[in-house]
Amino acid sequence: MTRITELPGVFIHESAWVDAPCSIGRGTKIWHFCHVQRDARLGEGCVLGQNVNIANGVIIGSRVKIQNNVSVYAGVELEDEVFLGPSCVLTNVTNPRSQVNRQAQYERTLIRRGATVGANATIVCGITLGRYCFVAAGAVVTRSVPDYALMAGNPARIRGWMSRHGHKLSLSKPGDASACPESGLRYIMDDNETVRCTDLSENAPLPESLETGRLAYRAAQKP
């Protein structure tokens, strides 16, 4: 098997193993003891912490951060700016058995843009985690999650709603509005109990002035 040790604009630690062929965007860092398997696709500016395994053919967007001891299995797709906490568990088979080969039955799990999965959380396969949702540490997620939802418990349930910057919003019923205390961005719950940001398109990146959040918030507080 051919090993890749150097790619333009990509940092690959000497202890990491990257199979050829694969596609890795500029600015990505692959740290100690990682394994990126063949045909994987990683976008720009990603960070893979220690002992991360990326399976064959997995698609990962840009600016994704994967903490230590995480395996991203075939069938899992990560959009841009996803955060996976240490030792969180992703699956691709609902009923695994060592004696039964179910490689042809992998279920697709989609983790959408900006979502956060906390340390030691488990994501059951075949579901979608919505944009900017926040899965608490240790939660076990068994069904699809809406955008901006805060999920906690076993099985995980909606415990509230989170802003893009990761702060809990004061939203509980349709028509409620709330502002993120860090960025000042405003959010509303629609009649169908869907949460959306009223100041930015769902597909828009954060403006540079909001990447540190408090700049916009402090400016809004001035008389």
Image: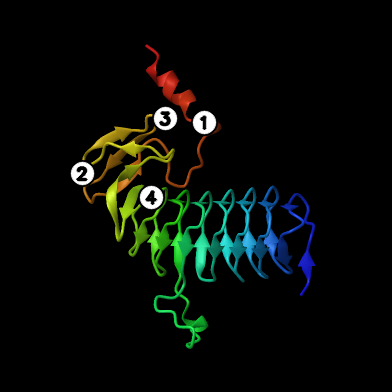
Left/right placement of residue 166 relative to residue 155 reads: right
Q: Quadrant of the C terminus?
A: top left
Give me the residue at 68% from left, 50% from top.
Answer: 29
Could you tell me residue 52's position as x and y percent?
60, 60
Q: Which mark is residue 136?
A: 4
Left/right placement of residue 127 relative to residue 7 reads: left
Q: Quadrant of the N terminus?
A: bottom right
Q: CA distance from mark 1 to mark 2?
A: 29 Å
Could you tell me residue 37's position as x and y percent?
66, 68
Q: Disc 3 or 2, which lies upstream in sequence?
A: 2
Residue that label 1 marks: 212
- The amino acid beneath tag 1 is Thr
Q: CA distance from mark 1 to mark 4?
A: 22 Å
Tell me the quarter of the picture where residue 50 sits: bottom right
Q: Disc 4 or 3, which lies upstream in sequence?
A: 4
Q: CA distance from mark 3 to mark 1?
A: 8 Å
Tell me the quarter of the picture where residue 95 sits: bottom left
Residue that label 2 marks: 174
Residue that label 3 marks: 182
